[in-house]
Amino acid sequence: MTDTMTVTGAAALAAAARPWTTGTERPFVRIDRITKKFGDFTAVDQVSLDIFKGELFCLLGGSGCGKSTLLRMLAGFETPTSGKIEIDGQDMAGIPPYDRPTNMMFQSYALFPHMTVEKNVAYGLLRDGVHKSVVRDRVAEMLKMVQLHTLAGRKPHQLSGGQRQRVALARSLVKQPKLLLLDEPLGALDKKLREETQFELVKIQETLGVTFIVVTHDQEEAMTLSTRIGVMNAGRIIQVGEPPQVYEYPNSRFVADFVGTVNLFEGRVIEDEPDFIRLAVQDLPVTGEGSGAASAGGAGQIYVGHGVSCTIDQPLWYAVRPEKMRLSRHASDAPNSYPVWVEDVAYMGNLSVYRLKLPGGRYLLASKANLSRYEEDTISWGEHAWVSWDDTAGVVLTQ
Amino acid sequence: MSAATGIARGRTGRLLRRLGFSGRALVIAVPVVWLLVFFLVPFLVVAKLSLSQSAIALPPYLPLVEWDEGMAIITLNFGNFTFLLDDPLYINAYLSSLKIAFISAAAALVIGYPIAYYIARSPEGRRNVLLMLVILPFWTSFLLRVYAWQGFLRSNGVINNFLLWTGIIDQPLVMLQTNFAVYLGIVYTYLPFMILPLYANLVKLDDSLLEASADLGARPLSTFFHVTLPLSMPGVIAGFMLVFVPAIGEFVVPELLGGPDTLMIGRVLWNEFFSNRDWPVASAVAIAMLVILVIPIMIFRRAQAKEEAL
């Protein structure tokens, strides 16, 4: 209970700080137009990124998007083809991994199989020539923090996945690095353990004040953990922002689709006013209520309740998330309302996800929070219904 | 496969099963019978010989069992073994063999480790080519290759001629018929046996462990001694034993490259058997050597078991 309270408290504090909004603070990690090529293949393409002290920054992307390569360049395992990396004001060019102020937590954990938990954690300190008695105290302290002090004498193969993960974390933190790099840190854990560890990780990060850069393909993990997310695709950073920003204001179809679930429509501008626009969308049915139905040329319309810098006939995309949609038995007076057929309902416990078929054959996903335990007469599969959303529910995308 | 199931299902299969045979036992029977006939029986013959009395006869020993009026009289002669302890020649030969084998194995390790490491770290396509090069000498007769070394090491051999020609030396070095030549010959002959198990171990080494070590502040040399070497210990022991054990009993290399003072147990055994025609003592030498060898082989087996457990 107290744990969650500290987490929320600290998160609020971190949110209050947000140095990336002010632009006055010097970034702690400065990635400047970094490119990495493997032969003909460009793994990382002209990436620039500023990360601030105390941040928990998530690099989010699918496999092969270059996020791990970027992390490995920060650790010093890969040399950039071009560009510059600065950590705490120091240029990292030519500095080998063992001289960098970073530590890494490996995806495979990379624990030394021939050493006990204690020796694994002590390894980094011993290589630095720290006095044995100091090492013993620091290791004991670290193991206590990750709640492994009772297993200090075990070898890695005698540990469970979750325990190994904590050893790896303790080992990478014991040297108190300025920057901790985590490669899919929670990838190998089951869902329950992953959720617990996410909070633990945030707590540790807040107490130690270390800057974290986390690589993950799991958008949920990125949302829970990070102060900011950098969404990557094909070696490029597509969008950088705080989790709500990335989720609610994606800057592209890729981000909208990759982070969370989304219904994406391809449309054409048919009305462009200072405080609203109207899109013609082939996939949507004509409802007859919107004005200018003629100019839509037989296509359905979406009404967007804010101005967008565009021109008439310009092709645009419109993205709306399932939870922003409402489902009812009768046509609503919302600006965007369409008849659908409920093809399927997936009951997930906390919410129900509806698979809806539009008259044109296109499918939509809508979700509804299950607010009460028992609802009389809910809309179920095989029914005709109306789906609707507000004029501010979706986001217009130009790319 | 189909034949085996055929047998197991058929009438004969049922019969075999009733007699206590299963498919598994039949498969295992082949190597077991092989070992019985070609290893255990000859070993027992040698053991029997080692306990009999030498004689000027044909064969040159007295039978172990004599029949006298329906009674078997067994005469066991342990004198051959006590003789080995009495005559310092044998103890010296054993110690010298162990020493030569140990130094050779150590030298092979020092030379073989970097080679195995290099091959294991090479790109995958190149590894097979390099491994082929390691195995390539086996395509030529071992005896021929050792003879070839004579040509290299002789006073007027390739090496001396070259050094004389360059003017580094002004008279030939004595290399043939020295212990140096024996070490060289053994290391040369057995190097692949060192490289192959080391390679098999090192190729499994997880790159991320080396990266983790570097990441935690260890320089390359430190990483080698703290991570690579300890993790390759099973390979080191396997390679060491594969060189050490056969080198103890080595006969060809000391005979062809060694001098008259190169004392090795294989040569002593040869002399005892063919020159002295003392079959019982020769057998005792062989049995004693076997006992000495069993100990390192057991160490080897344990190292192997440990590697499998990892």
Image (cartoon, helix red, strand yellow):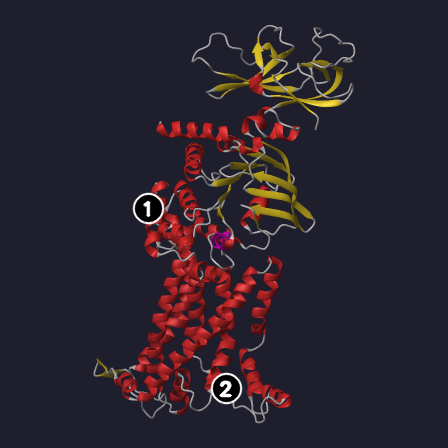
C-alpha span from label 2 to label 1: 59 Å
Residue A114 rendering spot, x and y as whole percentages: 40, 55
The vertical placement of B246 against B87, above or below, is above
Residue A321 rendering spot, x and y as whole percentages: 59, 21
Residue A52 visible, this angle = yes
Toward which corner of the image does residue A22 lie, by quadrant? top right
Numbered disc total: 2
Toward which corner of the image does residue A389 lie, by quadrant? top right
Q: Quadrant of the C terminus of chain B?
A: bottom left
A241 or A87: which is nearer to us? A87
- Same chain? Circles 2 and 1: no
Residue B30 visible, this angle = no
Q: Which residue is drawn at 72% across and 23% down?
A: A316
A386 or B19: which is nearer to us? A386
Residue highlighted by disc 2: B256
Residue B86 belongs to the span the image colors magenta: no
Callout 1, which amino acid?
Leu
- What span is colored magenta in the figure? B208-215
The vertical placement of A37 against A355, above or below, is below
Q: Which chain carries label 2?
A: B
Q: Do the residues labelled 2 and 1 touch (CB within 8 Å)?
A: no
Q: Is the magenta stretch mostly helix, strand or loop?
A: helix
Callout 2, which amino acid?
Leu
Q: Which residue is drawn at 67% across and 46% down?
A: A42
Residue highlighted by disc 1: A151
Secondary element at tag 2: helix
Packing grade of label 2 (10 A; few <14, some 14-19, many >=20) is some
